[in-house]
Image (cartoon, rainbow, N blue to C red):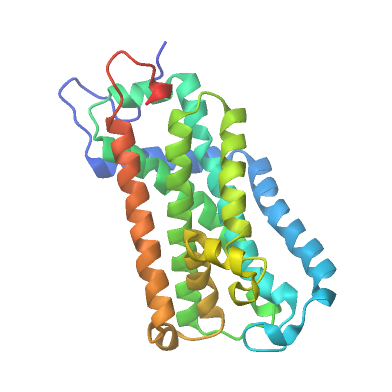
């Protein structure tokens, strides 16, 4: 028996895009609140990476090679850890799409009188809110990391993390829509997303990378997102927006996010009549 949708009322009822989006996002948020193990898992792995790599690799790196000079590797890796946390939170949030399909909920949503845009935006908004809740916890460590940043830079960091969350959740949506099992989803996401993160200057500076890796990193959209995320830690809003490299990264990241959201809507609309929902 198909589960009722949160939008269904009378046969003539048609939920607005906003109502449907908020209903789906709220459902994912409530699901997260009721599963504290997800919070422990998505926070624990980045923290473990941060502590182990920070302690193990700090003696191997010359602090003078990092931006600003005198920076420890633990400080350098902190923005990369934030990006990693957003990545894992997004992966865990979009996997619920497969669970919703298995439980029949997604079929009910597809049959409801709602726009396909609301389905994409609802899942992306829900995943983004979940990721931002977890990112906010890690952001509390900024004063203890030696960073001296103003309120404007904090706002820029939060906004950048939100944009990165939208991109990761949207990409996860695209992958999950066609997957029939959670195991397959995990395999594909780890195969694609982890290399993107490793080659994004999260672990080592772009400037010190070998030539062959530097070329790959320049075409990696995660690299430009890391430029956006790292810049406010070392400069205020005026300095960032006066930097051509920062503006380039902003344009590329915004373009990637819009492309992913457009692809998600197209993917949902392309479901052919008579085919299983899992095959889009």
242, above or below 107, in the image = below
Residue pushed farthest front?
A: 212
Q: Nearer the viewer, residue 57 or 215?
A: 215
In the image, what residue occupies the spot 39% across and 38% down? Answer: 24
> x, y percentage for residue 1?
42, 10
Residue 205: quadrant of the picture:
bottom right
- 252 lies above or below 175: below
Image coords of residue 57 (percent x, y): 81, 69
Give the number of marks: 0
Side of 135 relative to 265 (left or right): right
Q: Which residue occupies the extreme left position in the image?
A: 12
193 relative to 245, above or below: above
Of 182 and 212, the residue lying toward us: 212
Pick whichever, 174 or 99, lies toward us.
174
Residue at 27 percent across and 35 percent down: it is: 116
Q: At 67% across and 75% down in the image, what residue appears?
A: 76
Residue 19 position, x and y percent, is: 28, 41
From the viewer's perspective, tell me whether residue 264 is left or right of residue 159. left
Q: Residue at 66% of width from left, 82% of height from top? A: 66
Q: Is residue 253 left or right of 193 when viewed as pictured?
A: left
Q: Position of residue 190 (x, y in %)?
A: 62, 43
């Amino acid at each position: 028996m198909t589960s009722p949708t949160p939008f269904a009322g009378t046969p003539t009822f048609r939920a607005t895009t906003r109502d449907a989006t908020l209903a789906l996002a709220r459902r994912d948020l409530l699901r997260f609140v009721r599963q504290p193990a997800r919070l422990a898992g998505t926070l624990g792995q980045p923290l473990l990476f941060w502590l182990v790599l920070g302690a193990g690799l700090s003696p191997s790196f010359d602090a003078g090679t990092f931006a600003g000079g005198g920076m420890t590797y633990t400080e350098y890796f902190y923005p990369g850890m934030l990006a990693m946390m957003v990545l894992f939170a997004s992966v865990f949030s979009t996997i619920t799409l497969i669970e919703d399909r298995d439980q029949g909920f997604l079929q009910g949503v597809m049959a409801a009188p709602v726009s396909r845009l609301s389905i994409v935006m609802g899942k992306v908004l829900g995943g983004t809110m979940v990721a931002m809740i977890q990112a906010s916890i890690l952001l509390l460590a900024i004063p203890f990391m030696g960073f001296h940043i103003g309120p404007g830079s904090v706002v820029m960091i939060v906004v950048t993390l939100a944009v990165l969350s939208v991109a990761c959740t949207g990409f996860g949506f695209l992958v999950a829509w066609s997957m029939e099992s959670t195991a397959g989803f995990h395999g594909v996401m780890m195969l694609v997303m982890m290399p993107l993160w490793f080659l994004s200057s999260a672990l080592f500076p772009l400037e010190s990378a070998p030539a062959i890796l530097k070329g790959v990193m320049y075409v990696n959209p995660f690299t430009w997102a890391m430029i956006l995320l790292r810049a406010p830690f070392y400069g205020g809003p005026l300095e960032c927006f006066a930097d051509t490299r920062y503006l380039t990264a902003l344009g590329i990241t915004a373009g990637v996010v819009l492309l992913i959201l457009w692809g998600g809507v197209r993917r949902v609309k392309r479901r052919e009549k008579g085919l299983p929902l899992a095959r889009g």
